[in-house]
Image: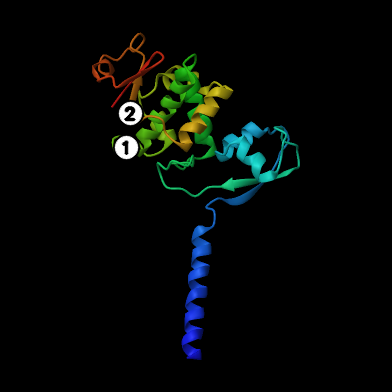
Amino acid sequence: MKQTMRKIIHIAAIACAAFIICAAPASAKMAHTVKKGETMEKISFAYIVSIDDIKKWNHLERNTAIEGDTLRIPERSSKPGNDRGEPSIAVSKEEKKLLAQLVHAEAKGEPYEGKVAVASVVLNRVESSEFPDSVKDVIYEKNAFSPVGNGTIHAEADNESKKAAEEALRKKSVDYLYFFNPETAESEWIKTRKVEKTIGNHSFSM
């Protein structure tokens, strides 16, 4: 009887431990030491984590980053296309910057929704078997985006473009593979694509 009870207690203990592990939050934490000239916005963009989340994890009320401070950053492990605002595609810091620069060059003057959609098109191409499999290769694919050809891709992205790129990396807003401005597009082929959605001056299609 005692042996049976011990087995029951042992099994219950294992089950309890397993439950605790499975139920633990998926957001482990990493540390970031604030460097000279860094802002909360730059740190948020680098880690694809909102400023509000950084403040929450560090019990901060201020929106400024102080040089030398060590901040706890939520580290999210996620599956593609989830609904919890977590990254769907792994990209390097260089690619995040490049994506924001493309958004800035392609969607300058467009509504914020349109900027997020432009970034989403790039990410959709990364996931599509019809295109290269990295953000950098998609953007630099021959004749894919006019800012690469005319050099405007190298201009510094504004804050809204950075925010739009970050949002798209967390959760894409559209499923389309192409976008174009019907008034300025030089390609006759792109104009033959069926327009699925229009945001600002851009038409989006599959």
Q: Quadrant of residue 123?
A: top left
Q: Quadrant of residue 67?
A: top right
Residue at the front extreme, as displayed: 1
Q: How many numbered discs?
A: 2
Residue 173 vs 150, above or below: the answer is: below
Residue type pointed to by label 2? Leu
Residue shown at 47% from the left, 23% from the top: 103
Badge 2 density bin: few <14, some 14–19, many ≥20, Cα 10 Å: some
In this view of the protein, can residue 181 be seen by the observer? yes
Tell me where residue 3 appears, x and y as whole percent: 49, 89
* Mark positioned earlier in the residue sequence (2 or 1): 1
Tell me where residue 180 appears, x and y as whole percent: 35, 17
Residue shown at 70% from the left, 32% from the top: 63
Residue at the top extreme, as displayed: 183
Q: Tags 2 and 1 in contact by the CB under 8 Å rule?
A: yes
Residue 161 vs 43, above or below: the answer is: above
Residue shown at 54% from the left, 28% from the top: 163
Q: Nearer the viewer, residue 90 or 1?
A: 1
Residue under label 1:
128
Q: Quadrant of residue 68?
A: top right
Disc number for residue 54: none
Q: Nearer the viewer, residue 10 or 192?
A: 10
Residue under label 2:
177
Residue type pointed to by label 1? Ser
Q: Nearer the viewer, residue 22 or 109?
A: 22
